[in-house]
Every structure is written in structure tokens, then in C-alpha cells.
Image (cartoon, coloured by chain):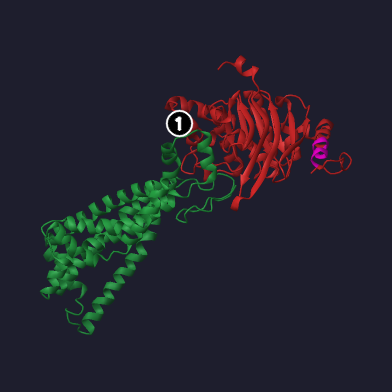
Amino acid sequence: MSLDPTAPALFSLPAEAEAQQQPSARAGEGGARGRSLARSVLPPLVLGVAFLLLWQLVVVVFDIKPYLLPSPTDIAGQIVVVLPLLWSSLLATGLNALIGLVVGSLLAIVLALLASRVTVFDRMIVPIVAALAVVPIVALAPILNTMFGSTSDTPRRVVVLIVVFAPVFINTLRGLRQVRPVHRDLMRAYAASNWQLTRTVTLPGAVPFIFTGLRIAAPLGVISAIVAEYFGGLQNGLGSRITSAAANSAYPRAWAYVFGAIILGLVFYGVTLLLERLASRRRA
Amino acid sequence: MTDTALNALPAISVRSAGKIFSVARGAEVQALTGIDLTVAPGEFVSLIGPSGCGKSTLLRLIADLDSATSGEILVFGKTARQARLDQEYGIAFQSAGLLPWRSVQANIELPLELHGVGKAERAARAEELIELVGLSDFRTRYPDQLSGGMQQRVAIARSLAERPKLLLMDEPFGALDEMTRERMQQELVRICSETGAAVVFVTHSIPEAVFLSDRVVVMSPRPGRIVDIVSVNLGPGTERSDALRENAAFFAGVTAVREALHGSPVAPLGADLR
């Protein structure tokens, strides 16, 4: 059988072997799953702990001043102190990132679908997307603040939307263009409508590509949401807390909020990864 | 659409059909010229010839995947386009063309689903077909868990889903190994005679064409045309088994097709059959 050369490398290529290679991951759960979890979680955990210990050691031994580099224990202490505020800031920034990510991705997917079907539209939108991809958010955020007013979360959400759009659009469009000629012939033989072709062949085929885009876009969205807060406006998110803590020379506190930002980014990345797993599980 | 009405009409009637492909900068390639061919209901016809003889193109014209430049193609008395829109044929290609995100059953149900057949009825029909092609244990598997031969069987089951009176097959066994291929041929010949469908089967294997067919259409390239039509009298498909492959009538058929392909008598019988 011809292997599909266009299949994204995210999926293991189908083995040529006679039928049942893998007795499917569902069998033999329990212990095996626990062990594999331990194998994938333990090494980075060990490395992380070792890194923190080394950090602490370096700060103590060389007596490094907190404004240069606070020790992990200082930061942890601050995390405990500001926990309620950290939590609310994390939610505020997280919500901005989420709204921007969802709206931006949906827009990107819909426009990519349109571009894959209408050649004229394709020609029109591709340069615009290229322009969007290089928009400096540093320049854009203050302008949007003025545009929407500095008491609104909208400018931040728009920044996230713009940043997220390009990677999702480009990957989705690429995925939509991967239709194999044999599938096209088949759907023509079935006298399938354009919408049926999209729904049963084109869009499902593009799913792995869409997720590649989302995986790039999700952490990018979080970073943009934080950076957008550096340019004034509401003081409710992680970015504003980091700047104000740093402005007050409260460096361990600034670091505590940075820690929150890392957690938020990881959550976004993790959830995207999880969704991708769920979507691709049905593909064997 | 009753059976009697169908029987009065040929399954396929091609009259002086031609196909010209325009390639780069106004250059043209005459892919087919002066094709005349009639296929009776329930008849198994193979198209054979060297690469570039237009056999796949002819099949695609009948399926209305491409349109003829000249001449007339009727499928059950309708234009090829109308026949396609009315779903008068089932089709299978050299690559199985299964959708990798659908299970075996969902792949077989695809045409039924597209044409609005209800869920329960779809499942029942898929069950029958899975049984027919011997994949009962693999219903919930995905294409990449199947061997090439199994994938091709799923594709054949899918082509039979809507009980077509005509099957169009473009080298469906072309990528299979010889053993799998012979087994698949035997299954196909059985399935086709059981369902009573007419078949147009594109191949470049002489033994395959002879084993399967009632008639073998021999084609020649540049420009693609029919040079001969060889009748094979090996009895009904239900009686064609492996034993037939060592039968004198089978050898005679192979020789006849080979001579038609080469345009002259070749090595004596039995000297070289591959």
C-alpha cells in the first residue's frame, strides 16, 4: 500500500505489518499506565528539583543580592504571601488569553476553510496573514489601549487574537490542502457536495495540522496576554503585577508572579496537548 | 428502475469516444481515440494493455471522473454524468483510499452516509459486507491496523455498499503480492457473480484478466485504442477456482490475450506463463 507521504510526522506512520501489531493501549491498563506515567513525569521532576537546589545553593554560597537573583525559598515565601492575589491575576490573564485564543483560532480555521475553497479569497488573505504575523505587539498594545480605553480587557484580548491567528491559519490551510487525489475522485464518484467533501474528508484530514498550529499558538497567546499588560490599562493581571512589583524593587514578589505566568503557560500547553490526544485517539 | 428495464439496456455503451489531454503550452496528448465498447449487464470485462494505453482513462471517462473529448458514453442508457449523479456504479482504485480516521465499518458506511441512509440500515448493510469480504473480526479496526490486502477488501466492500449493478475497478490488486492477489481475485469473481454486477476491471496482468473475465479488451498506446477483444470461456464466476489456473482453457486464454497484446504468436504454450 502506498503510505501517504503528506501525513504529518506527528503521527506514527502505519506499519506495513499484517494486521494487529498493537493489542491497543486499552488492554493491560493499571500498572502499565502507572509505570509509563512515572517514566515520563519522574525525570523532568528530578531535574527540576535538582535545578532548584543548585539555584538555592548558588544564591546562598555566593551571597547574591535579591535584586539580582532571589533564592527559590524567598520566591516560595512570596508565593504564599501573595497567593490570593496571584490566583486572581492568573485568572484574569488566563481569561484574556483563553478568549483571544479561542476567538482567534476559530476565526483562523473558518478563514482557512474559505481560503482553501475560494481561490480569489486565498490570494487576498495570504498577504494579510503574513502582515499580521509580523505585527509587533509591543507597538500594537498601546495603540489598542487608546482605541478601546484603558479600563477594558479588550485590547489584551485583541492582541492575543492577532498573535494566535497566523500560526493556526497557516497550519490549518496547509492541512486543508493535503487532500489525496484518490479521496477527491472517490467523493466525486459519490456525487458528494462541497460541504460533504469538507466535512468528511478535508476537515478531518486537517485536524492534526490544526493542532500543530494550536500547540504553537497556546503558549504564545499566554505570553502575549502578559506582555500586553505592560503597556498600562487595567492592573489586574500577571503582567501588571510583575511590572509593579519590579517598580517597587520587590524582586522576590515579581518572581512569584513570573512563576504564576509559567504555570499558566504550561496549563495552556497541556490542555492543548490533551485535546490533541483526545482528537487523535480515534485514529488508532 | 426494474430489473427488466436494466436488462434491456447494456450496462455500458461507449461509441467512438476519444480523449485529448492538453498539457503545457497548448500541446495536446491524444489519450484515447475511436473507442467502441459495449458491456452487457452482469458481464465481467477487463481492460488490459501497457502503461499509457489509456485503460485507466477509459475507466475514468465511464465513471465521469474525466469527460470525453468526443464520442458518446452511456451507462445504463444515461450519460456518464447522469449515471454518476444517480450513483449507478461502485468504484475501487489501486490505492484503497480509505479514510484513516474512520474504522473499517465507518469506511464501508461512507457512501451510504453521504446519500442519507439511516443509521440502523447503514450498520446492517455494513455488517453484511464485512461478512462478505471476511473481515468480521476487524470491524472496529482502523485502516493503518490492516494489511494492504485487508484494506483493499474494505475498499471493495465499500464499492458494493449501494448494491451497484456496475463496478468500476482500476487495478485494485496492483499493489498486492502474488498470493494475496490470487486469493482476492477468487473472492472478487465469487462476489461479482453472486451480486450479478457488471464489472469493468483495469489490469496489466494477463493471468488476472483471463481468470476474472468474460471478455478481455486489449488496448494499445499512442494513441490509446482497442486492438482486440478476446472472449474467455471459462464458465460462470462461481465455478472459477484455483484449479482453473492450471487448466488448458485458462492457458489458451492467456495465450490468446498475449498474442493480441504483442500482435503476433509468441512462445509455445507452457513455455513461460508469467
- Residue A33 in sight in this render: no
Residue at (49, 44) in percent of width and height: B100
Label 1's element?
A: helix
Chain seen in red: B
B56 to A70, vertically: above or below:
above
**Total tally of numbered discs in the picture:** 1
Q: Residue furthest bottom?
A: A62
Q: Nearer the viewer, residue A194 or A1?
A: A194
Q: Residue at x 10, y 58 (%)?
A: A151
Percent from the top left, x then y, of residue A214?
34, 55
Q: Nearer the viewer, residue B94 or B7?
A: B7
Q: Main secondary structure of the magenta part?
A: helix
Query: How many other residues sit within 10 Å of disc 1, few (<14), some (14-19) or many (≥20)?
Result: some
Query: In the shown orientation, is residue A230 left or right of residue B71?
Result: left
Q: Circle 1 is placed at which residue position?
A: B113
Whether the magenta-drawn stretch holds residue A3 is answered as no
A262 sits to left or right of A237: right
**Image hue for chain A:** green
The foreground one among B73 and A22 is B73
Position of residue B59 in the picture relative to residue B223 (left or right) = left
Q: Chain of mark 1?
A: B
For residue B264, say whether it is visible. yes
The magenta segment is: B255-261
Task: Pinpoint residue A27: horizontal percent, then vertical percent.
Answer: 44, 45
Q: Quadrant of residue B212?
A: top right
The residue positioned 32% from the left and 58% from the top of the image is A217
**Residue B136, position as x, y percentages in the image:** 54, 33
Q: Is residue B52 above or below residue B226?
A: below
The kind of residue on which mark 1 rests is Glu
* The stretch drawn in magenta includes residue B256: yes
Asked if residue B181 is positioned above or below residue B6 in the image, the reply reads below
Q: Nearer the viewer, residue A76 or B243?
A: B243
